[in-house]
Amino acid sequence: MLLTAAASPRLHTSLVAALVVGRARVPPPLLSAAGWPEVDQVIGQSSPAALAYLGDAVFELEARSRNLWPPRKLNALNGAVGVFTCAEGQCAMLERLQEGFAMTEDEQEWLRRGRNASGRGPRRLDPKVYRAASSLETLVGYLYLSDRARLEQLFEFAFADGLAEDDEDAGDEGDATRDEPGGSPASESES
């Protein structure tokens, strides 16, 4: 259903007000009859687990986007992304962030809330690792909704070291690992 200004004058008024005042609004998936809720309202009413859920998706997409080049087979690509998106990789990334990235008090608070809201996690993992990964995902979810420029700074710092090491390994094999012409990459995606 396409909403136009003629169909919903109240929605149009809230959109214009958002543009004029410059208030951040949540995108259309959270659209209600009263218009878009403000970001502060969504963040305030979301649990840290819900923000971690969002942060997990955002983090996965960022890791996939940053690992697209140089071209490689899907298995190699999935392995390279998995290094960053597994709980151990996120825990290591959080340690690097805490050592070298200047986090605000608000960001530290969201890390704490995410850590405290997470459960024990899978048996194969140390609970501290799982909680650290959950806290990073909570922070990513929070920053995705509240401050995308700051999130980009965090990603630039967090992925800088890991991708440089990955690029050195993949640079030697970059051309050799491409799919052969006429080959079927569909068989690799069945995992």
Image: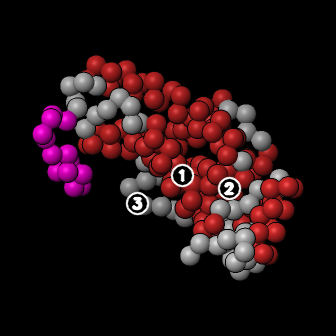
Main SS class of the magenta portion in the image: loop
Q: Nearer the viewer, mark 3 or mark 2?
A: 2
Q: Secondary structure at mark 3?
A: loop
Q: Secondary structure at mark 1?
A: helix
User: Is residue 80 depicted above or below 143 in this figure?
Assistant: above
Label 2 sits on residue: 145
User: Is residue 77 depicted above or below 3 in this figure?
Assistant: above
In reply to whether residue 1 is colored magenta, the answer given is no
Residue 123 image label: 3
Which kind of residue does numbered mark 1 sit on?
Answer: Val
Mark pair 3, 2: CA separation: 31 Å
Sequence-first disc among 2 and 1:
1
Q: Front-most of 102 and 124?
A: 102
From the top left corner, tell me how far across and down residue 184 is, in percent: 15, 46
User: Is residue 150 depicted above or below 13 in this figure?
Assistant: above
Which kind of residue does numbered mark 3 sit on?
Answer: Arg
For the residues bearing labels 2 and 1, Cβ distance under 8 angstroms: no
Most extreme residue toward the bottom is 33
Label 1 sits on residue: 58
Q: Taking 57 as reference, is 82 left or right? A: left
Sequence-first disc among 3 and 2:
3
| Quadrant into which the C terminus falls | bottom left
Extent of the magenta region: 179-191
> From this viewpoint, is residue 131 visible?
no
Most extreme residue toward the left is 182
